[in-house]
Image (cartoon, helix red, strand yellow):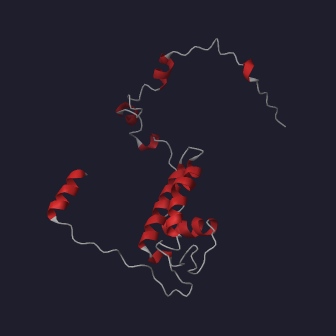
Amino acid sequence: MVEVNIAASDEWDTNNEAFDGDDYEDEFESEDDSGYETDDAVDEYEDEADAPPTKEPKFADVIEWVNGFFLPVIRRRISDNDGGLSWDPRWWAYPEVVARLSALHQAWEEARASDSMSAMSSWWIQHLEPHLRVILDGDTGPMANAKSDRSFMGWPAMSADPVPATVTKNILNQE
């Protein structure tokens, strides 16, 4: 058993600790005022052999990720058009579902490779939950009205009128 000695808050002596900005600046001298590394710091890794190791993706593509992570881990009560959650085993037939699951896969791989201990928690809250609400929405989601007999293949693509040239110019100039 490991003993941990935790000092009471009144035992901390901060009177002898002085902070001068020099120590901070020395530690981060390769960063500019924005907090980003300058070119001098980036040059340090010009030789790829010297670069920090990168974590290889666990799943090569969205199909592997859906089958290896998403389907085994994400479990919800799915109903057949009774206002609950909708899921079609042919998820790959719905372009929006494929796009959202692809985005989730990429964000999951990024969180997995992150050194941040909270990255995966953030992935669940900031990525998975909002996408899952849309993907599984039984009223308006892309697989709404999916039937267990597979008689429904999703909603048709939304229509759009051609964009007039003058509007196109305005839109492209705003970017």
Residue at left offset 34%, top offset 74%: 158
How far across and how far down the image is residue 18, in percent?
Answer: 58, 13
In this orientation, which residue lies closer to the viewer: 168 or 63?
168
Answer left or right for 42 relative to 17: left
Identify the image quadrant of residue 156: bottom left
From where the camera sits, is residue 27 visible? yes
Is 137 displayed left or right of 36 in the figure?
Answer: right
63 lies above or below 80: above
The residue furthest top is 16
Q: Quadrant of residue 157?
A: bottom left
Q: Residue furthest right?
A: 1
Residue 126: x and y in percent read: 52, 53
Viewer-side residue, 116 vs 49: 116
The number of callouts visible is 0
Is residue 107 shown above or below 138? above
Quick one: quadrant of the N terminus? top right
Quarter occupied by residue 37? top left
The foreground one among 23 and 46 is 23
Q: Position of residue 173 (x, y in %)?
A: 20, 52
Q: Is residue 61 visible?
A: no
Residue 21, above or below 82: above
Q: Where is residue 75 shown, x and y percent of the image?
A: 63, 68
Query: Viewer-proximal residue, 108 or 45?
Result: 108
- 108 sits to left or right of 162: right
**Which residue is found at the position 42% from the left and 78% from the top?**
155
